[in-house]
Image (cartoon, rainbow, N blue to C red):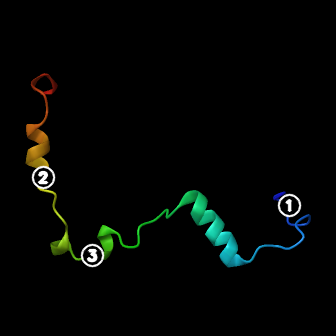
Amino acid sequence: MSGSPELDPQPESDWERRQRLAAVFGDVLPEETSDDRPADSVKSDGKGDDWYRDQVPPHHG
């Protein structure tokens, strides 16, 4: 592929271009973000702020 549209014998279709880019870069954005979900449906991994504060080494205060 030369990268130049003038030299390509047959330009790729839109779906072929999207498929090629998805194969290289993957999905950039998630299907659903936390802003799309109600606040009460947030998945918790059990590591709240208190857990992170407890993990700070003593010399980091």
Which residue is depicted at the point 32% across and 75% down? 36
Query: How far is the residue under mark 3 from the one under mark 1?
Result: 43 Å
Query: How far is the residue under mark 1 from the one under mark 2?
Result: 52 Å
**Mark positioned earlier in the residue sequence (2 or 3):** 3
Query: How far is the residue under mark 2 from the one under mark 3?
Result: 19 Å
Q: Is residue 8 left or right of residue 47?
A: right
In the structure shown, which secondary structural element does the residue marked by tag 2 occupy? loop
Which residue is depicted at the point 91% across and 64% down? 7
Q: Is residue 39 left or right of residue 15?
A: left
In the structure shown, which secondary structural element does the residue marked by tag 3 occupy? loop
Write down the quadrant of residue 35 in the picture.
Answer: bottom left
Residue 50, image x and y in percent? Answer: 8, 47
Which residue is depicted at the point 11% across and 55% down? 46
Where is mark 1, residue-wise? 4
Where is mark 3, residue-wise? 37
- Crowdedness near tag 3: few (<14), some (14–19) or many (≥20) residues, C-alpha within 10 Å: few
Where is mark 2, residue-wise? 48
Which quadrant holds the N terminus? bottom right
Residue 51, image x and y in percent? Answer: 9, 45
Which residue is depicted at the point 22% across and 77% down? 38
